[in-house]
Image (tube, rainbow, N blue to C red):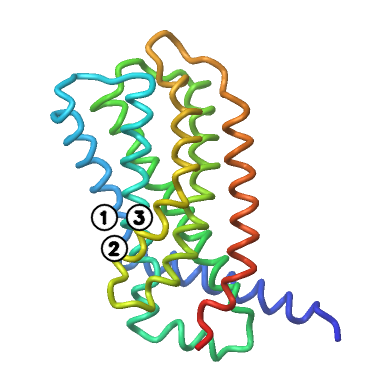
């Protein structure tokens, strides 16, 4: 039996689900405003809590990534809520398409959300906290680190969001399961970002941390694709 019809159906399902997710967020914004507001508020809290007008290097990198991580957990917790409450997941399970279409569409949607939040959060971070300025080269290098880390966060958030949504304590279960697995992402991203945020001038990106982020994205992306189908089995 040819696999081509199934592949076409999966691609169409992913496209339809992705359009639905983005259109829903556009019409009734819920996730993006919450994540963006959380990020900016956290930067304000850090500014006063650290009792410093500016931060740099390792401290700046740590503040940035801790804030983005918890903003991401806030978004991941809302990723499946509308589908769960309105029967969207049940409808998809009854449709003749691969369940992994839901994984791909949710992961891409979440990745888009993360990027859009960072477009707002990063300028706020620079204005409120960052001591040294960022050159265009620094911004491009930091954008690369952000994107590679966002892929890992999106995969883990999507995978464990699907698992947590089936429990009563989903707001508690999701961070308890996801945060330990995201430790390598945050450490690698923070180490890679620190030289770019140093007051002495940006150094070159540490290649080993970028390689670690790339390996993490690949391994957990394949793992999520392999196990997602079984998360909704009774």
131 w.r.t. 121: above or below? above
State the residue in front, 191 or 99.
191
Mark 1 / mark 3, whichever is N-terminal: 1
User: Dot 2 surroundings within 10 Å: few (below 14), some, or many (20 or more)?
Assistant: few
Which residue matches tag 3? 73
In whole angstroms, how far apart are the C-alphas of marks 2 and 3?
A: 14 Å
Dot 1 falls on a residue whose secondary structure is: helix
Residue 7 percent across, percent down from the top left: 73, 75
Q: For this view, does 59 lie left or right of residue 160? A: left
Q: Where is residue 116 in the image (x, y as percent from the top left)?
A: 41, 47
The alpha-carbon separation of the residues under discs 2 and 1 comes to 6 Å
Residue at the (48%, 15%) spot, across then down? 202
Nearest to the eye among marks 1 and 3: give it: 3
Picture coordinates of residue 76 (x, y %)? Answer: 38, 60
Q: Is residue 126 above or below residue 86?
A: above
- Residue 30 is labelled as 2
* Labels 2 and 1 touching (C-beta < 8 A): yes
Q: How many marks?
A: 3
Find residue 204 and report its horizontal and vertical position in percent: 57, 18
Residue position marked by numbered label 1 in the rendering: 34
Instruction: Mark 3: give few (<14), some (14-19) or many (20+) Cα within 10 Å.
Output: many
Hey, which quadrant is residue 32 in on the image? bottom left
Q: Which residue is drawn at 41% across and 8% down?
A: 200
Secondary structure of the residue carrying numbered label 2: loop
Above or below: residue 205 compared with residue 145? above
């Amino acid at each position: 039996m040819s696999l081509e019809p199934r592949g076409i159906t999966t691609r169409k399902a992913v496209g339809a689900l992705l359009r639905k997710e983005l259109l829903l967020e556009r019409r009734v914004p819920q996730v993006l405003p919450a994540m963006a507001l959380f990020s900016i508020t956290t930067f304000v809290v850090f500014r006063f809590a650290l009792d410093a007008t500016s931060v740099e290097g390792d401290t700046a990198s740590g503040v940035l990534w801790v804030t983005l991580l918890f903003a991401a957990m806030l978004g991941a917790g809302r990723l499946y809520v509308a589908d769960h409450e309105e029967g969207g997941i049940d409808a998809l399970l009854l449709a003749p398409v691969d369940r992994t279409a839901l994984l791909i569409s949710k992961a891409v949607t979440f990745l888009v959300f993360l990027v859009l939040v960072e477009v707002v959060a990063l300028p706020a971070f620079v204005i409120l906290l960052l001591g040294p300025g960022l050159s265009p080269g620094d911004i491009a290098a930091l954008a690369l680190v952000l994107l590679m880390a966002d892929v890992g966060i999106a995969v883990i958030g999507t995978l464990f969001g699907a698992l947590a949504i089936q429990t009563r304590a989903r707001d508690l279960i999701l961070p308890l399961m996801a945060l330990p697995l995201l430790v390598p992402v945050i450490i690698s991203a923070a180490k890679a970002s620190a030289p770019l945020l140093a007051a002495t001038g940006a150094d070159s990106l540490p290649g080993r941390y970028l390689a670690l982020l790339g390996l993490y994205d690949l391994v957990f992306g394949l793992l999520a694709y392999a196990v997602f189908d079984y998360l909704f089995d009774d």
